Each structure stands twice: as C-alpha cells, then as structure tokens.
Image (cartoon, coloured by chain):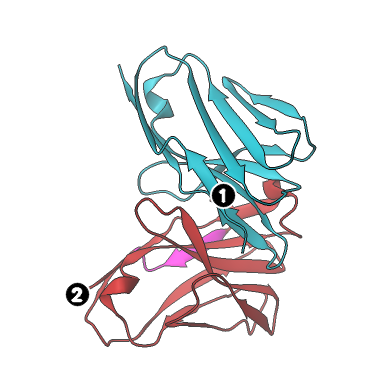
Chain colours: A red, B cyan
C-alpha cells in the first residue's frame, strides 16, 4: 500500500454531520478512485478521476462529493452522513488505464461508522 | 455497469487442502484480476490475466482466464493458515476506467 495515504483510519459520525476523507498519492498517478466496501458486497465504485480537474460518478455516488484540484489529492466528502454510509472506504490510484491491473495501488482503508 | 458473480461465498478448509474459486460475468472482460484482502488492510493484487486462455501462477496460486472471456478461476494448492482472507476477482469497467469487483470468497483455514 505504499504511496496511497488515507486519513482518518477510523471515524464515528452522528447522522447529519459532514466530513471529508482524505486521500493522497505521491506517485504522480493520473487515475484515482474511491470505493466503499460493505459485508458480502465486495468493493463498489463511488467516484473516480482521470486527472486534475476531472471527476465522474461511479456505481454508488449519492451522498458523496469529490474534487481533484491537484494530481496528488482526491478527497471524498460526505455531505450529510447517514447510517447507510457506515462502511469501509478505500482510495486507489493507478498509473494508467486500469486494463493493466498491476499498476493499481490501494490505501489501507478508512472505517466510518455513522450513528 | 458490469457485474461479477463470485463463488463460493465462503470456504472453511483444513490446512493442506486445495482450494478453487471462480468468477463469472455476463459480459466480456479483457483483463481479469485476483486480489486478496486481509483483515484491516486494503486489497493486494495476486495475479493479473490479460489474454483468453492464459494460465498464470504465483507460488501456490494459479489463475486462468476463461476462453469465453466471461470467467476466471483461482486455485490455491496445499493451503496454509496465512491463506486466510477474502479473495476478490476484479476487472476493468471499460466505461469508467476503474475496477468492478466480485463480492469475494472468504477463506478460512484450520491448522
């Protein structure tokens, strides 16, 4: 997981609160993405970015915003936290198109609980 | 988006046994990836497959890219306790330049 740093590692939020999960990579990767992982459902794509200033929605984007002002950073914002957003969040970055999977790096995950 | 169906959902085996799991899709994938996730960690790539029919090994792990491009298999031989974890198949979502993941196979190995 070297090179992709996620913070915080753990967070507890109250319903309605907002927060930002930070993700930074120092490998000069163009592609970055956010996934959430729920029990028995694998990882699902929330948002992704193909470069600075460019973002797009993934499979489950509702309730989340992203921005990509620099190549290095790709923060994920929860606008008004809901219990359904309790999950483990993973940030990933890749060197090129994901067709070459050995260039994809994952962060260590952020465990979020919304009460 | 594309969906991957992974089976079995979980396995509980004795140390030394061989393990087989598979992943299928209703659409064609040009790349198949197999990841392992240990508790508290992010997924780590085990094997990447890029051509139909390809058979690739990584130590005791062997994965195959199905001829139809709609399936892939992962085999683990002579399992050991450190094989415990969740194994995911994944493939590139051609529309979104990110990965689509299967739901995972949870493997438990009893010493």
How many numbered marks, from 0 up? 2
Residues B55 and A108: in front is B55
Q: For residue B73, what is the image quadrant?
A: top right
Q: Which residue is mark 1?
A: B4
Please state which of the two labelled residues, at mark 2 or mark 1, is closer to the viewer.
Answer: 1
Q: Position of residue A19 (x, y in %)?
A: 36, 82
Residues B11 and B71: in front is B71
Q: Is residue A115 above or below residue B55?
A: below
Q: Is residue B9 above or below residue A109?
A: above
Q: Is residue A91 magenta?
A: no
Chain of the residue displaying label 2: A
Q: Position of residue B111 (x, y in %)?
A: 30, 16
Task: Tell me the residue at 55%/69% (across/down).
Answer: A24
Circle 2 SS class? loop
Left or right, A113 with respect to B9, comes to left
Q: Position of residue B77 (x, y in %)?
A: 52, 16
Category of crowding for the residue at label 2, using alpha-carbon neighbours closer than 10 angstroms: few (below 14), some (14–19), many (at least 20): some
Q: Is residue A8 magenta?
A: yes
Q: Which residues are magenta?
A: A4-9
Q: CA distance from mark 2 to mark 1?
A: 31 Å
Q: Using the image, tell me which numbered label, if any, was put on residue A41.
A: none
Q: Is residue B93 above or below residue A81?
A: above
Q: For residue B81, what is the image quadrant?
A: top left
Q: Is residue B46 above or below residue A7?
A: above
Q: Which residue is mark 2?
A: A115
Residues A78 and A25: in front is A78
Circle 1 SS class? strand
């Amino acid at each position: 997981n070297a090179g992709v740093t996620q913070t915080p590692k753990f967070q507890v939020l109250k319903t309605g609160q907002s927060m930002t999960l930070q993700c930074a990579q120092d490998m000069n990767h163009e592609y970055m993405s956010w996934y959430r992982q729920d029990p028995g459902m694998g990882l699902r794509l929330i948002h992704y970015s193909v470069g600075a200033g460019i973002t797009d929605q993934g499979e489950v984007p509702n309730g989340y915003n992203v921005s990509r002002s620099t190549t290095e950073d790709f923060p994920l914002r929860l606008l008004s936290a809901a219990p359904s957003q309790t999950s483990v969040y993973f940030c990933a970055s890749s060197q090129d198109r994901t067709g070459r999977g050995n260039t994809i790096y994952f962060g260590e995950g952020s465990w979020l609980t919304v009460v | 988006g594309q969906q991957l169906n992974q089976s079995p959902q979980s396995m509980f085996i004795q140390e030394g046994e061989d393990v087989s799991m598979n992943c299928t899709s209703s659409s064609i994938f040009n790349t198949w990836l197999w990841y392992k996730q240990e508790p508290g960690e992010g997924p780590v790539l085990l094997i990447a497959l890029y051509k139909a029919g390809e058979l690739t090994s990584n130590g005791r792990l062997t994965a195959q890219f199905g001829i139809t491009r709609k399936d892939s298999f992962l085999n683990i031989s002579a399992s050991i306790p450190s094989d415990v974890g969740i194994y995911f198949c994944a493939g590139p979502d051609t529309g979104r330049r990110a990965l689509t993941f299967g739901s995972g196979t949870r493997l438990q190995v009893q010493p």
